[in-house]
Amino acid sequence: MGQPSGDASASSQLTPMRALEIVRNNEEGQVHPSVTAVLEKAVAEIWRKIQAQPTSYTMSRDEFAVFNFYRNRFKDSQVAQQAVARFWNHFRGDATQLNGSR
């Protein structure tokens, strides 16, 4: 199906959500480093925003999908747990439509 390992030449057009889709649909276990780089950059930026406003920042739907993919990385962080709870407390919509719903 599709691009199982991503395409380095398309990395400049690769969004975090597309990168997340590539990783989740990859059955081979290896993805192109550019795909991983997009996700790492995105989760770092999301974490920076959360840390800048630890009691008030609410992730967008797409930010939550990326952050949730890396959630195990933040499993011991009270700030991360509160950010996830804040997302769910403010979420409006169908949770089954989210990537990584609870």
Image (cartoon, rainbow, N blue to C red):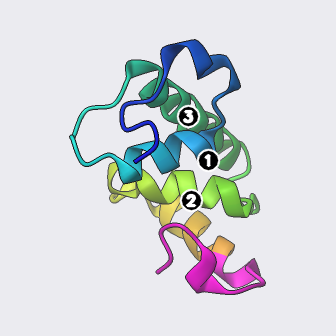
Q: Please name which of the two marks, 2 or 3, marks the residue nearer to the observer.
A: 2
**In which image quadrant can residue 65 be found?**
bottom right
Q: Taking 32 as reference, is 81 above or below it?
A: below
Q: Where is residue 8 in the image (x, y as percent from the top left)?
A: 50, 15
Q: Mark 1 vs mark 2: which is more N-terminal?
A: 1
Q: Taking 84 as reference, is 17 above or below it?
A: above
Q: Which mark is residue 8?
A: none
Residue at the image point whose x is 52% and y is 53% from the top:
67
State the residue in front, 98 or 57: 98
Q: In this view, does 6 lie to the left or right of 53?
A: left
Specify the amino acid type for callout 2.
Ala
Q: Name the residue under label 1.
A: 17
Specify the amino acid type for callout 3.
Ala
Q: Residue furthest top?
A: 9
Q: Is mark 1 on a helix, strand or loop?
A: helix
Q: Can residue 47 be seen in this view?
A: no
Q: Can residue 17 be seen in this view?
A: yes
Q: Mainly helix, strand or loop, the magenta region? A: loop
Tags 1 and 2 in contact by the CB under 8 Å rule?
A: yes
The magenta segment is: 88-102
Residue at the image point whose x is 59% and y is 20% from the top:
11
Q: Which mark is residue 65?
A: 2
Q: Taking 32 as reference, is 79 above or below it?
A: below
Q: Mark 1 vs mark 3: which is more N-terminal?
A: 1
Q: Is mark 2 on a helix, strand or loop?
A: helix
Q: Is mark 3 on a helix, strand or loop?
A: helix
Specify the amino acid type for callout 1.
Met
Alpha carbon distance from label 1 to label 2: 8 Å
State the residue in front, 81 or 21: 21
Q: Name the residue under label 3.
A: 44
Q: Is residue 21 left or right of residue 24?
A: right
